[in-house]
Image: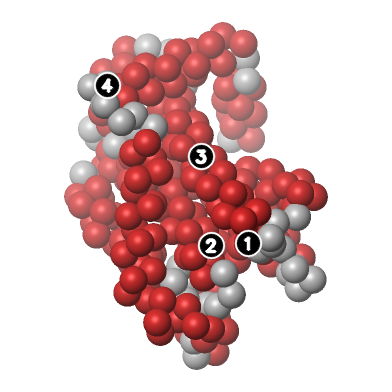
Amino acid sequence: MIKRITGKIQKLFTEYNRNLLMELISAEFKAYEQNSILGVCWNLLNPAITLLIMYCVFERKYGQHVKFYPLFLLIGVVTVNFFITVTTRMIVSIAINWNIVLNSTIPRENFVLADLYIYTCKFLIELSLCCLLSIFYGVFAWPSLLLLLPLLAAYAGLVLGFGLIVSLLYCVAMDIDHIWRIASRLFLFITPVFYSLEHTTPIFAKLIYWFNPITPFLIAFRQVFIWDNTFNIANYLYSLFLGCSFLIFGYFIFVIFENTAIERV
């Protein structure tokens, strides 16, 4: 099994596969932007509307106790939306390309990686807004960008590992798409998007921290963009550990069950 995984990884990093992946990304990007007038502006409009609604609803109850609440809220919205949007798209990545998967030698991981690449670019655009707002408030430290890059890579690893697993589950049971679309929306509430863990009960805070993998990342992203002297290095390292662990576990499951799952489509 180790040799099989090593061989697949080596194949992914060949120049031939990199070219295939870039062609797939280009095709996917054109499909997303086809007949779109506003194009990339939609990527900014979605979090802006969500931010506005949440700010109007929760500012009076939670915003009074949180510094720089608009920035606090924006970081929460874009971080959780990235996870929800990408995983929802990844679920069907392999199944909708079933004919290509069966009739070509393209590594199946490429279809999931293409979606991750496109949405990560969109996520970077949204994070740039967080950066600008952080600069506006005067709480951004340029050295924190060095901490942002590993954190972003680890978060992408978390999403990719989870996406690889759910893409196989969809091949076996297509109901997983509907179930996940409903369940994923709960992350806006079971992740401290519009509230702080300090303002919840100790039991609830521990539950959503240890059993919701997005929470440590959200805390880390906020500490990067809202820089002060209370940076939690333990939480930062834990986030990196979570990202690597989910990626390794998700890819291991993918390699074991990919053939079985695709035969069920």
Tag 4: amino acid: Gln
Alpha-carbon distance for marks 3 and 4? 20 Å
Answer yes or no: do the residues labelled 2 and 1 have beta carbons within 8 Å? yes
Q: Is residue 162 above or below residue 119?
A: below
Alpha-carbon distance for marks 2 and 3? 15 Å
In percent of width and height, residue 198 lies at 57, 84
Give the total of numbered labels.
4
SS type, badge 3: helix
Give the mark, 3 or 4, whose residue is nearer the N terminus.
4
Alpha-carbon distance for marks 2 and 1? 9 Å
SS type, badge 4: loop
Quadrant of the frame with the C terminus:
top left
SS type, badge 1: helix
Answer yes or no: do the residues labelled 3 and 4 have beta carbons within 8 Å? no
Give the mark, 2 or 4, whose residue is nearer the N terminus.
4
Q: Is residue 208 left or right of residue 42?
A: right
Residue on which disc 1 sits:
137
Residue on which disc 3 sits:
125
Residue on which disc 2 sits:
71
In terms of depth relative to the viewer, which is nearer, 223 or 189?
A: 223
Tell me which corner region of the image, top left, top right, bottom left or bottom right, holds residue 137: bottom right
Q: Name the disc covering residue 34, or none.
A: 4
Alpha-carbon distance for marks 1 and 4? 37 Å
Answer yes or no: do the residues labelled 2 and 4 have beta carbons within 8 Å? no
Residue 252 in view of the camera: no
